[in-house]
Structure formats: structure tokens, C-alpha cells
């Protein structure tokens, strides 16, 4: 757009730009949404069904059956250990402590196996992780034992058991995962050295 008076000599003319006018009632194109990075998916789980798709994924019946069978096995193992190692209300609940700490260590081992060693087994984590170890560990009994010890008048035992179980469970998960990762890496190095041995001898 040109501004200025053409009839006035010597006056400078300025060229300005104005945005185009949008007629009333006209529809403007919507802004495109920003792409969202997909969340990481565990290799042994089913991918999510995209939004708007009417189709269903794989049947969950085998997963539920695996969890149920594993939970029964884990619960029976926990019951057997607790029955063989009872404790009085005023004593330290060693059986529950050992069950939870050992179960957490096995969870650390399992997480390394299903993510780095045995990848793509759909029912392995539901059966062993959610089922067996979920039924084996019992933090509800852990809370109940703390309550029983506190009401029995041995608050010192209750506080020690409360703290030691939490610390021991977290350290057990870390130790199980680290030890399994180290063993898998060592096994991989041994395999590489074994494969290179005949090649070097033949040369």
C-alpha cells in the first residue's frame, strides 16, 4: 500500500504492508499438532492399539492364565516357607523378611533376563514376574507384622523390621540386577574368546 499525497510536490512516498483481511465467516485452517514422541515399549509386552483403530490386539486370556498359574505357585512357596519358619508376635519375622528380600533379588534378576537375554517372550514376565514373584512376596504381611509387633509392646523390633525390610528389598533388587548383568556380560566375553580361538589357531 502506497501512502502520501501525490498532489504535493517533494513529499516522500512510503510503501507499507498491511496483512490481508480475512472475510467474516471464513474458516481458517487449524494448526497442525506437534508430533509426540512415542513412549518406550518393553520388548515382551504387546504394543498399544493406536487411537481411532477399531481392531483389537492379541487375546489377553493367555496372559491372565499365566499370571494365575504363576501366582498360585508363588503363594504356595510363600505359605510353605512361612509355615516351616513361624515366629512369635514379639519376635523378629524372619520368614517374611527372607521371603520379601529374596523375592526382590529375583525380580532384579528377572528384569535383566527379560530385557537383555530372553527378549520377546510374551508370557515370561507375566508368569514369573507378576505371577510367581508377585504371589511369593508379601508386603501386606510385612505391614501386618509391623503392626503386631508394635501392639505387642516391642516397638524397637517393629521399627528395626520396618527399616531393614525396605533397605534390604531395594538393595536386593539392585544386587540381583547388577550381578545378573555382570554374569551375562562375562558369558558374552567368554563366547567371543571361544569363537576367536579356532580362527587364530587356523591362521
Image (cartoon, rainbow, N blue to C red):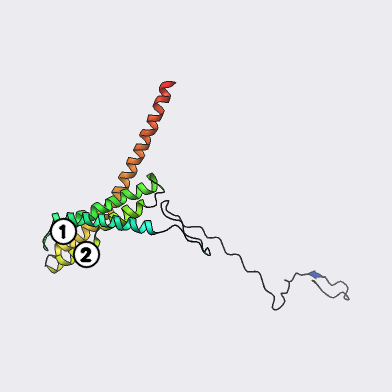
- Relative to 137, say whether 116 is above or below: above
Residue at horizontal 22%, vertical 64%?
143
Percent across and percent down for residue 129 are 32, 54
State which quadrant residue 6 falls in. Answer: bottom right
Q: Is residue 15 visible?
A: yes
Q: Is residue 71 above or below residue 23?
A: above
Q: How many marks?
A: 2
- Describe the element under mark 2 as helix, strand or loop: helix
Residue 126 placed where, x, y %? Answer: 35, 55
According to the picture, the residue beneath numbered tag 2 turns out to be: 143
Quadrant position of the C terminus in the picture: top left
**Counting residues from the N terminus, which is met first, the one under dot 1 or under dot 2?**
1
SS category of the residue bearing label 1? loop
Mark 1 Cα shell of 10 Å, populated few (<14), some (14-19), many (≥20)? many
Q: Is residue 136 visible?
A: no
70 left or right, relative to 6: left
Drawn side of residue 5 relative to residue 23, left or right: right
Residue found 34% across the figure and 44% down from its top: 181
Identify residue for label 1.
93
Task: Give yes or no for contact between labels 1 and 2 (Cβ–Cβ under 8 Å).
Answer: no
Q: Position of residue 97 (x, y in %)?
A: 20, 56
Give the Cα separation between the discs numbered 1 and 2.
11 Å
At 38% from the left and 30% from the top, the residue drawn is: 193
Amino acid at each position: 500500500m502506497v501512502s502520501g499525497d501525490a498532489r504535493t510536490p517533494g513529499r516522500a512516498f512510503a510503501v507499507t504492508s498491511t496483512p490481508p483481511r480475512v472475510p467474516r465467516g471464513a474458516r481458517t485452517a487449524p494448526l497442525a499438532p506437534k508430533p509426540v514422541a512415542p513412549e518406550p515399549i518393553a520388548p515382551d509386552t504387546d504394543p498399544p492399539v493406536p487411537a481411532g483403530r477399531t481392531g483389537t490386539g492379541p487375546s489377553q486370556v493367555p496372559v491372565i492364565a499365566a499370571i494365575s498359574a504363576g501366582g498360585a505357585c508363588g503363594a504356595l512357596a510363600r505359605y510353605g516357607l512361612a509355615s516351616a519358619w513361624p515366629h512369635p508376635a514379639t519376635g523378629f519375622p524372619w520368614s517374611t523378611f527372607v521371603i520379601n528380600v529374596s523375592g526382590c533379588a529375583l525380580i532384579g534378576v528377572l528384569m535383566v533376563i527379560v530385557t537383555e537375554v530372553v527378549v520377546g517372550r510374551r508370557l515370561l514376565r507375566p508368569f514369573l514376574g507378576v505371577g510367581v514373584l508377585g504371589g511369593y512376596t508379601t508386603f501386606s504381611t510385612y505391614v501386618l507384622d509391623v503392626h503386631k509387633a508394635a501392639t505387642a509392646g516391642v516397638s524397637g523390633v517393629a521399627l528395626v523390621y520396618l527399616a531393614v525390610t525396605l533397605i534390604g528389598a531395594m538393595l536386593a533388587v539392585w544386587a540381583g540386577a547388577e550381578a545378573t548383568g555382570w554374569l551375562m556380560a562375562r558369558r558374552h566375553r567368554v563366547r567371543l574368546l571361544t569363537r576367536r580361538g579356532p580362527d587364530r589357531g587356523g591362521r
